[in-house]
Amino acid sequence: MLACLRAHRPPFRALQNPFPFQSARYPMVKTRRASALASSTEDEQFERPTKKVKLEKTAVVEAAIVEIGVVEEKETKKAPKRLRKPKATTNIDPSTFLERIASPWKVGAHVSAAGGVENAVTNAAAIGANAFALFVKSQRKWNAPPLKQENIDAFKARMKEYGYTGDVVLPHGNYLVNLGNPDAEKREKSYDCFLDELKRCEQLGLKLFNFHPGSTVGGTTTAHSLSLIADCINRAHKETHFVITVLENMAGAGNVIGGEFSHLADIIAQVEDKSRVGVCMDTCHTFAAGYDIRTKETWDGTMSEFDSIIGLKYLRGMHLNDSKAELGTRKDRHENVGLGCLGLSAFQHILNDERTQGIPMILETPSFERPVDVWGKEIEILQRISRTQERLKLQVKDGVAPLVEVVQEVRAAVKAAEAASGKEKKGTKPKAAIKKVQKGKERVMVNEDENIDEDNGMSAPSAGTSKKTRKPPTAKKAPVKKKKMESEDESDLTEYDEEDA
Ligand SMILES: [Zn+2]
Ligand SMILES: [Zn+2]
């Protein structure tokens, strides 16, 4: 039976027929088709028995701190060359991939491109994603070797094989880039990096490129920074062919540009080729910046504001993140969908709004190194609530109770992943080995926060999560010269490993 399934189930088939199997092997299909009121058996499928283990995330966090130290050294001195690590994602077994639901809402996640950009495609397919994001080069380094032709070819081949088109992929820009920096030399360095990333997108046949607009670094006015950003975009458009530059809205702490819709509108107004500029709305950032989206009414209100200030035609993508921080706090703290201040009902409105159809909608939530378990579950649930809203309304008078049950599935998946992730690290590897492996970016997903690089003024991922951590000895020896900001941290999760790519 298994062999039969494998032989007869090329991944693209699954796209054409979203429900090819109804068997115990594919319980998710059954779940999705079943009523949104999950039965107890369905709950059992997703709620692994977990001991209440104190979550052990410090190792990962420490490694992230170490890694920042390494990055800084590389930028300034020249760190000793790291050992090559083994390639990730070598064994592809499509029979283990989660079912991908045919839907007008293209939900996916920011997946790992470790081991080569082509691996992002299979990592997306594995979690049942209809869209995905990736880094097209290291997100924390200025320079990276060019993409190899073999990786480009493999990427394109897999895109075709797994049925993804260039407009459902939303690459995420480097964290160091600040096109709004008033310092001409630093801005030029950012521009070069930005342009390189745009060219990589075009090499890969990708139509969109999402990036953080920039920061004034406290050295100029917002208006001036906005025009500097627009200038860079105009230059880049002339040096590239088709890729659309997508401005991400931000939580808007400190000097960061993009917390107000008007910032993005002002940039767009100064962009010459308006067919090649767009906006990505991050739900967490939107909320943290003070735009409420928790109810149908507030979501519609925020969308109206977006439309009148920016224009809905510029909406080219979304980041689907719940928020650990409250409305208007300007703190960028991503949370798994349904488990934060937004709540699952916010996503229900978004996933039933025709205006968000067809654009990549990307999860940047913590996956605890279990993308299939966590993001797979989040994607499945988002698709489920987008299709069953009417039924939910019918079954419970206020339409809320079923969502509570659905949220429990997310919570269970997250808890299990956290526990498994922590247990694995504690149980199977000595601490030193963990660090070494993680320093080499073997870990696939880490909940990273962004800090502001004082020097550059832009957010860069750092070790500080909102959870308590302690610094490893290496961090003490080489203190990280980054100011811990109140916000603009981001769970943009995934590694890109240019050494292997
Ligand atoms: Zn971002
Ligand atoms: Zn964020």
Image (cartoon, rainbow, N blue to C red):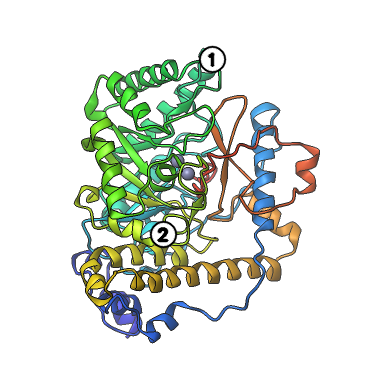
What residue do we see at 44% from left, 83% from top? 44
Q: Where is residue 236 in the image (x, y as percent from the top left)?
A: 35, 22
Q: Which residue lies furthest to the front in this view?
A: 397
Comparing 97 with 324, the one in front is 324
Describe the element under mark 1 as helix, strand or loop.
Answer: loop
Comparing 274 with 410, the one in front is 410
Comparing 143 with 37, the one in front is 37
Q: In which quarter of the image is residue 474?
A: top right
Residue 20 is labelled as: none
Q: Where is residue 449 in the image (x, y as percent from the top left)?
A: 57, 45
Residue 440 located left or right of residue 261: right
Q: Position of residue 94 (x, y in %)?
A: 36, 68
Select label 1 or label 2 by which is in front: 2
The correct choice, above or below, for 214 with respect to 18 in the image is: above
User: Which residue carries the number 2 mark?
Assistant: 343
What residue do we see at 39% from left, 37% from top? 248
